[in-house]
Image (tube, rainbow, N blue to C red):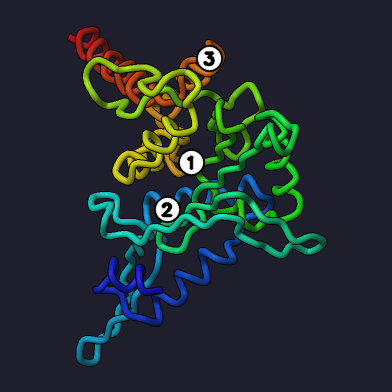
Amino acid sequence: MTALVRLNPHIPAAVLDDAARQVIHGNAAGLVQANRQFHRWLTAGVPVEINKQVGEISETLGDFVRLIDFANPDNNEWLAVNQYSIEGPKHTRRPHIVVFVNGLPLAVIELKNQAIDTADIWAAFNQLQTYKEDITDLFVFNEVLAISDYTLARVGSLSADQERFGAWRTIDPNADGVNLDPLGELQQLETLIRGLFRKDFFLDYLRRNLSVDWSVRETVHAKMRAQIKLILKRHKYPPNLELRAVELVLRQADALSEVWMV
């Protein structure tokens, strides 16, 4: 609650409590729908109503509670927990690393050490599928899944299959002249951590690159964004470069539409 209070000083405490309960419990049926609902709240804010009394006049105003300060990454509370223990209905599970922002478990990183576990990177992927079954509530809030065998590393989304988990190959994907595998091809985990999980980029990735904004999915841009990303995934385009590619195609489409309308 401390983060909610800090990010929303104009919202009454009782309303913030209601917003927190709304986020925790939700009202969507099924994991994927609940995750989409949470993503909408994360990026656009949690809709709330505030009752105000001015003299004898009472009015209800609509507002949004911010869960994240996207403009100022350091204004958020960041925490990465190793071997985070979660009790499910039938089993207790311990994901290797859970990344929290303002108390929200936005990313899960599962690791498999081939020397100890005699398992490869896809054993980590399979472990995530087990977690989804056994500790489902954790993944309502999930925005990023990452797997690694300490050499190779892949990143994907909640509903992604193996083919849609891709290597993260840059540390600064927004820089001019993208440098692929700057630490070497066998240092993919460190590249992933230093690239995707850099605070400013991570928040930008959540807001702009993860999925269509489902509240406006019927708009032209939303449809185009979904189709472009699907094509990029089919051709195994590096996921860390998706954002630039999608935005470039959208800008080109906008420019062409203006020309054609003349």
Please tell me whether mark 2 sits on a helix, a strand or a loop.
Answer: helix
Up the image or down, 5 lies above or below 123; here it is: below
Label total for image: 3
User: Which quadrant holds the N terminus?
Assistant: bottom left
Q: Where does label 3 land, which residue? A: 236
Residue 222, x across and y down, in percent: 42, 30
Q: Nearer the viewer, mark 2 or mark 1?
A: 2
Q: Where does label 1 land, which residue? A: 214
The answer to which of marks 2 and 1 sits earlier in the sequence is: 2
Instruction: Give the crowd class for mark 3: few <14, some 14-19, many >=20 residues within 10 Å.
Output: some
Marker disc for residue 169: none
Q: Quadrant of residue 179?
A: top left
User: Which quadrant holds the C terminus?
Assistant: top left
Instruction: Give the crowd class for mark 2: few <14, some 14-19, many >=20 residues within 10 Å.
Output: many
Residue 189, x across and y down, in percent: 49, 32
The answer to which of marks 3 and 2 sits earlier in the sequence is: 2
